[in-house]
Image (cartoon, rainbow, N blue to C red):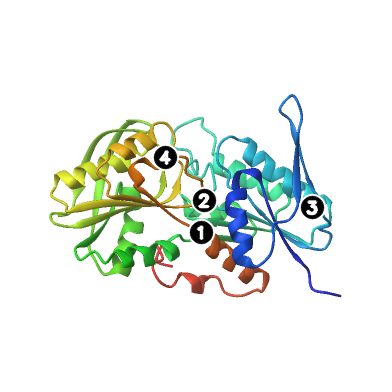
Amino acid sequence: MSEPIVSIFSGRASRYLAEKIVSAYGTTLGKSEVIKFSDGEFQTSYEENIRGRDVFIIQSTVPPADNIWELLMMIDAAKRASARKIVAVIPYFGYARQDRKDKPRVSIGAKMVTNLLTSTGIDRLITLDLHADQIQGFMDIPVDNLYASVIFYPYIQSLKLKNLMMASPDTGGTRRAASYAKALNTGFAICYKQRTKPNVVEKMQLIGDVSGKDVVLVDDIIDTAGTITKAAEVIMEKGANSVRALVTHPIFSGKAYEIIGKSPFKEVIVSDTIPIKENPDNKIKVISTANLFAEVIKRVENYESISSLFNIGDPNNK
């Protein structure tokens, strides 16, 4: 019996990234189609034979919710077409911020999404910088939670900042900032924020001396850009020489682009898990994840180690 053939497909939300991934992998994107009906309903289909193949489906679950639904339908179609193995490659895992009950009578969106993925039929999940590591435990299948540090670390080194200092825009990201600081042999600072309601920061204080430093704020998600921009302003007020942001997932909702354009950031470094729509004052630097995902797909298919990719600059120190 011949070896299973790898087929890589993409949902509509991540086709721009999937094209780069298959190019790095050394293949072409599989043929699939989405048929839309007049009432907004749609249907997915594969336009080539996938029987007995190992199918990788690339789709970030960014808003709107149709992107999740399209991914689920592609998984279901692959299962019904007798794919040998189905792997969901979700560069940005949406709803990951809803990983627990933080007040009474709320849903746990991350758990609901993982239930849908597993019940629909995936055999493995590949994602990048999950907002909450414990989401891996929501699933009873292998989960490869990759770290963007493997692409960010070399770029930070290339800047050759003599007074480099890492920082976290909130206390929740302390471990991430500390791990980057350890890998880069530098100190780190922490911003402490108080919120009155979601996406609104009322007060922020800085823990650490940033005077004369070239500070890099590290986070996994930049949404409205309110918190991280406020942190940048506080850091500059405390005498920093410059401030940059290093963020994996550029959601950029609301007035984020406008806020970044007016911010003191010298540079906002992001990955391409979500496409950017604007680039105010050319402040946004995009570093591609394509080579990383292509390499991981190869290693998954060949049963090779993935953890060895992340020995340097691992933000969770694993």
From the image, state whether disc 2 or disc 3 is nearer to you.
2
Measured in 3D between alpha carbons, the distance from the residue under mark 3 to the one under mark 1, in whole angstroms, is 27 Å
Crowd rating for badge 4 (residues with CA inside 10 Å; few <14, some 14–19, many 20+)? some
Which image quadrant is residue 94 in?
top right
Measured in 3D between alpha carbons, the distance from the residue under mark 4 to the one under mark 1, in whole angstroms, is 19 Å
Of marks 1 and 2, which one's residue comes earlier in the chain? 2
Q: Measuring from the top left, give residue 209's x and y in whole percent.
A: 15, 55
Q: Secondary structure at mark 4?
A: loop
The quadrant in which the C terminus is found is: bottom left
Q: Is residue 79 visible?
A: yes
**Where is mark 1, residue-wise?**
289
Image point (61%, 75%), residue name: 304
Residue toward you, 52 or 27: 27
**Where is mark 2, residue-wise?**
273
Crowd rating for badge 3 (residues with CA inside 10 Å; few <14, some 14–19, many 20+)? some
Q: Describe residue 317's horizontal placement relative to residue 28 as left or right.
A: left
**Where is mark 4, residue-wise?**
223
Crowd rating for badge 2 (residues with CA inside 10 Å; few <14, some 14–19, many 20+)? many
Of marks 3 and 4, which one's residue comes earlier in the chain? 3
Of marks 4 and 2, which one's residue comes earlier in the chain? 4
Picture disc at residue 79: 3
Of marks 3 and 1, which one's residue comes earlier in the chain? 3
Q: Measuring from the top left, give residue 258's x and y in whole percent.
A: 35, 34
Q: Measuring from the top left, give residue 119's x and y in whole percent.
A: 71, 47
Q: Describe residue 44's horizontal placement relative to residue 243 as left or right.
A: right
From the image, state whether disc 4 or disc 1 is nearer to you.
1
Q: Is residue 142 visible?
A: no
